[in-house]
């Protein structure tokens, strides 16, 4: 009996292998553009005809190839990018497998022109069915131009498998965009059937994001930026109002490589929770940078999926970074600060909440409406002593009508607002915060501080608590102006005309809280000094953020400019949820909060802490 196993001829083996890498014109576009990036090009031009079915050409001004390299480039596993197995875990280039050109050469008629700067003449190589059919010297500018014609001309089954031109062009634009977003410093152009489609000059990440998403995103992107030794997350998320019904404009890049990751998408979606209507998706362009040894790119034929050494950390970090970014821009979208007229008439609302007022208020018919669950902080403890209702042991819990969204901002319905306005100054706890001194505090999820009190324990929200502290501090600054630290290197701020007018109007109030900013005409300002307790270095960003937040307060809200400013400032400057704190820092927050006039709520009415009484805890255990 003769053997039945035989080796496939090269050209068939290559075609089979090509199927993995080159599935459609867009896959070839990706590979060729990535090669141009790897070659250090600063300009990359893509030309397609018939959605890439007739022609795909990529022209770059990168480092080019020698004659020998130009011929070898099309062999399978021909690569200049790795040479040892260790290199596989230190990859900083887009390609590394040496498969792309070999695959392309197996399924299209390829022509390569290339020249290195140090060479007088360039090289022309023509390939068909994986074979070099011509190799000559030619005149060529520095860089490389590869064109591939008639994709799948020799694999009719695959060619028939291609979709309509418009569908294939859409895929091409998708790949083009992904590469362009990864490398904003590079100029990219795309023309299709002789028509210019895109011309994106090189620039910043933000500029590229705007080129891709459209000018209307100019004011709709929130910058994300978190850095640790282990990884960096940067980029942009669209403000909630830009959310779409479809999942478009969602991009993750890991070490500048576009990847698909449902897992990380979930992290972002989670950070947006409560901010978006149901079934709508946030847009984002996020760049994750990690040490290449922490990822494995070699798990997917088109390298669009990668494996992280520790994906839980990445998840948590991405989520926290996005939350943090959103929190900095947070302004309650629809806080209704005006109360119903008849509710305003209520004595309890108009006058301070003294013991006898409490008495009269509790007898009012409306009171019944808001003494439901979780609103017991309105009820004086003395009167309710001995009552076993669970809620009476809470001293400060959001009303059941209120929901704190991601930013800790309260969405309030009018009746729950009554409760809150009561806690906002009309009624003040006699006991205040009585955390046991010098005790060890516990930080939970880098957001909550758990502290024992004389009569139980409190759970305090670090961000909201600090917001309260800063709010009162800035408020008092109008009596005693806040200290300023002079900037060593004054920062110049250039604004658009409408922001300039706004900032101009705010200068006086900003001065009170420690900002020394001068206008010098032409929409330009110079930041001479910043509040003494703010870290210098990011003044410009801080002011821009402030303006952005300030604009969110609509004109209907009856706050003075100063009040708005103070609210924005305290929110912006507060330490954020997700930040880990030392014992000292936690103690200092509690200390500062306990010195506040109204420690238990933020200016916008979110609770800053919740207290659990011993009796309640005992009750939980049937004691
Ligand atoms: P890989 O990118 O994985 O190395 P490719 O098959 O895409 O494999 O390319 C093979 C080799 O050809 C590359 O390693 C590189 O040396 C060279 N090459 C390909 N495209 C270009 C280009 N546009 N400019 C310069 N060299 C290139
Ligand atoms: Mg490549």
Image (cartoon, grey):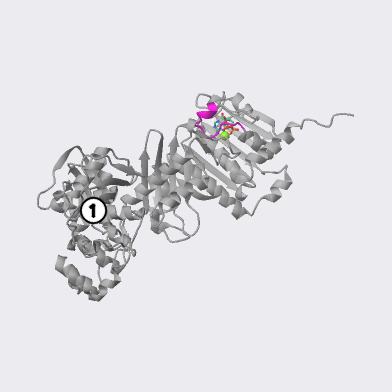
Residue 39, position in %: x, y?
Answer: 51, 32
- Identify the residue at image location x=65%, y=42%: 149
> Helix, strand, or loop for circle 1?
helix
Secondary structure mostly seen in magenta is: loop
The quadrant in which residue 424 appears is bottom left
Relative to the observer, which residue lies in front, 146 or 491? 491
What span is colored magenta in the figure?
A: 87-98
Q: Is residue 282 visible?
A: yes
Name the residue tied to disc 1: 500
Left or right, residue 322 beside residue 123: left
- Identify the residue at image location x=65%, y=36%: 103
Q: Is residue 108 visible?
A: no
Q: Residues within 10 Å of mark 1 (few under 14, many from 20)?
A: many
Left or right, residue 26 beside residue 232: right
Quadrant for the N terminus in the image:
top right
Residue 479, position in %: x, y?
Answer: 9, 52
Relative to the observer, which residue lies in front, 511 or 608? 608
Q: Can you tell me which quadrant of the image ligand 2 is in?
A: top right
């Amino acid at each position: 009996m003769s053997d039945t196993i035989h080796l496939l001829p090269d050209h068939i083996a290559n075609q089979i292998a090509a199927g993995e890498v080159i599935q459609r014109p867009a896959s070839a576009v990706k590979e060729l553009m990535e090669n141009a990036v790897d070659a250090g090009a600063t300009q990359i031009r893509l030309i397609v005809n018939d959605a890439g079915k007739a022609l795909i050409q990529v022209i770059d001004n990168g480092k080019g190839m020698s004659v020998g390299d130009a011929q070898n480039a099309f062999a399978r596993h021909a690569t200049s990018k790795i040479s040892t197995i260790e290199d596989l875990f230190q990859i900083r280039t887009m390609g590394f497998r040496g498969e792309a050109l070999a695959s392309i050469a197996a399924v299209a008629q390829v022509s390569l022109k290339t020249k290195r700067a140090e060479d007088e003449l360039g090289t022309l190589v023509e390939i068909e069915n994986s074979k070099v059919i011509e190799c000559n010297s030619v005149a060529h500018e520095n860089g490389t131009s590869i064109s591939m014609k008639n994709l799948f001309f020799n694999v009719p089954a695959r060619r028939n498998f291609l979709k309509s031109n418009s569908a294939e062009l859409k895929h091409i634009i998708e790949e083009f965009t992904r590469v362009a977003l990864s490398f904003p410093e590079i100029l990219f152009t795309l023309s299709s059937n002789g028509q210019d489609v895109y011309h994106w000059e090189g620039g910043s990440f933000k500029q590229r994001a705007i080129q891709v998403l459209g000018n209307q995103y100019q004011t709709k992107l929130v910058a994300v930026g978190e850095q640790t030794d282990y990884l960096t997350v940067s980029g942009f998320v669209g403000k909630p109002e830009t959310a779409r019904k479809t999942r478009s404009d969602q991009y993750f890049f890991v070490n500048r490589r576009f990847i698909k990751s449902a897992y990380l998408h979930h992290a972002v979606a989670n950070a947006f929770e409560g901010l978006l209507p149901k079934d709508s998706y946030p847009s984002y362009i996020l760049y994750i940078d990690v040490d290449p040894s922490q990822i494995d790119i070699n798990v997917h034929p088109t390298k669009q999926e990668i494996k992280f050494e520790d994906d839980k950390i990445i998840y948590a970090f991405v989520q926290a970074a996005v939350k943090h970014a959103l929190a900095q821009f947070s302004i309650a979208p629809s806080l209704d600060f005006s109360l119903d007229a008849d509710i305003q008439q209520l004595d309890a609302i108009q006058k301070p909440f003294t013991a006898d007022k409490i008495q009269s208020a509790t007898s009012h018919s409306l009171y019944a409406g808001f003494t439901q669950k979780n609103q017991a902080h309105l009820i004086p403890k003395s009167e309710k002593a001995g009552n076993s209702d669970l809620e009476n042991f809470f001293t400060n819990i959001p009303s059941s009508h209120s929901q704190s969204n991601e930013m800790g901002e309260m969405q309030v319905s009018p009746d729950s607002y009554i409760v809150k306005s009561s806690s906002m100054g009309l009624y003040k706890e006699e006991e205040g915060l009585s955390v046991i001194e010098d005790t060890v505090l516990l930080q939970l999820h880098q957001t909550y501080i758990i502290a024992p009190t004389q009569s139980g324990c409190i759970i305090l929200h670090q961000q909201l608590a600090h917001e309260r502290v800063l709010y009162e501090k800035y408020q008092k600054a109008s009596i005693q102006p806040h200290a300023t630290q002079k900037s060593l290197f004054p920062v110049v701020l250039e604004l658009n005309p409408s922001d300039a007018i706004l900032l101009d109007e705010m200068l006086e109030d900003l001065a009170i809280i420690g900002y020394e900013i001068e206008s010098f005409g032409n929409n330009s300002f110079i930041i001479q000094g910043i509040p003494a307790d703010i870290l210098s270095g990011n003044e410009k960003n801080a002011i821009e953020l402030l303006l952005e937040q300030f604009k969110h307060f609509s004109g209907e809200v009856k706050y003075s400019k100063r009040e708005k400013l103070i609210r924005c400032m305290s929110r912006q400057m507060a330490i954020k949820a997700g930040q880990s704190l030392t014992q000292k820092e936690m103690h200092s927050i509690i200390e500062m909060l306990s010195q506040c006039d109204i420690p238990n709520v933020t200016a916008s009415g979110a609770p800053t802490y919740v207290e659990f009484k011993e009796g309640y805890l005992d009750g939980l255990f049937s004691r």
